[in-house]
Image (cartoon, grey):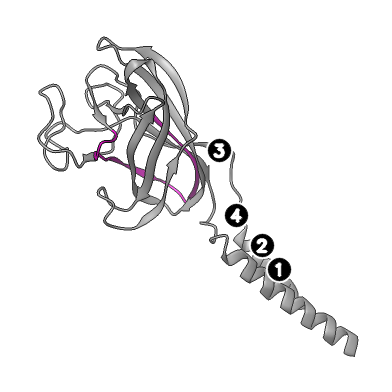
Amino acid sequence: MFTKHKIMAALLAGLVTTSVNADVLYSNGSLDGTTNALTLGGGLTVADSFNLSSNSVITAINFDTWDAFSQDVTNVDWAITSSADGSGTVYASGSQSTVTASDISTNAQGYVLDLNAFQVSSLALASGTYWLQLTNATTASGQYASWDINSASANAGSSLSWTNQTGAFSATNPCSGDLAISSVQCSSPFQVVGSAVSAVPLPSAVIPFVTGLMGMGFAGYRRLKAQA
């Protein structure tokens, strides 16, 4: 029975994965700030794809916006999904009211360019391709911020953008159509932050169950030992 107890302990230990310190797991290029931006709010949702090269735990998201009236983003609704329009699996979502905004500069159009960051509650994902959806990015005055488009930049990301806004793109905006993709790729700058792990951890609800199994095994071992 002692051997079985050790096996159960090893099983639980195997669920605890080794991770590295938080790092940028995916970067979709840097801020352009001059071409155009996609509104995040008023019924408009924008999504951009990202790829995880290994099993990972996501802890934060960074994204670049154009903000009017020199006001920072304070709230944003977000989701990480398996499809651009959210019709597939929604792995996590939320309404984030704690957004850290850092002013970068003011562009020629008079918008303040910001790098925004918010925390994600340790989302475990296997390697693969996912979509980051953003909407309702609001400032203190209730104005909607816009997600920068870096397609025309030399530092543009490799992913594809999508928006539920149609037919409202200017000649300087390379995005067009329902999928917001034309002959020139549309992308928006963002970073996915977290840790690469050796395996995707089990959901937190499963851990107490396995721990209970260990406890039952250990109790059985003690009873048999007492009877011996």
- The magenta stretch is 40-63
Give x and y (percent) for residue 225: 87, 84
What kind of element bears circle 4? loop
The reply to whether residue 91 is visible in this rendering is: yes
Q: In which quarter of the image is the C terminus?
A: bottom right
Does label 3 or label 2 sit earlier along the sequence?
Answer: 2
Magenta stretch, overall SS: strand
How far apart, in angstroms, are the residues tagged by discs 3 and 2? Answer: 22 Å
How far apart, in angstroms, are the residues tagged by discs 1 and 3? Answer: 28 Å
Give yes or no for residue 200 being in the magenta stretch: no
What kind of element bears circle 3? loop
- The image's mark for residue 9 is 1
Check disc 4 and report the residue beneath it.
17
- The image's mark for residue 13 is 2
Within 10 angstroms of label 2, few (less than 14), some, or many (20 or more) residues? few
**Mark 1 vs 2: CB contact within 8 A:** yes
**Mark 1 vs 4: CB contact within 8 A:** no
- Amino acid type of the residue that numbered disc 1 sits on in the rendered structure: Ala
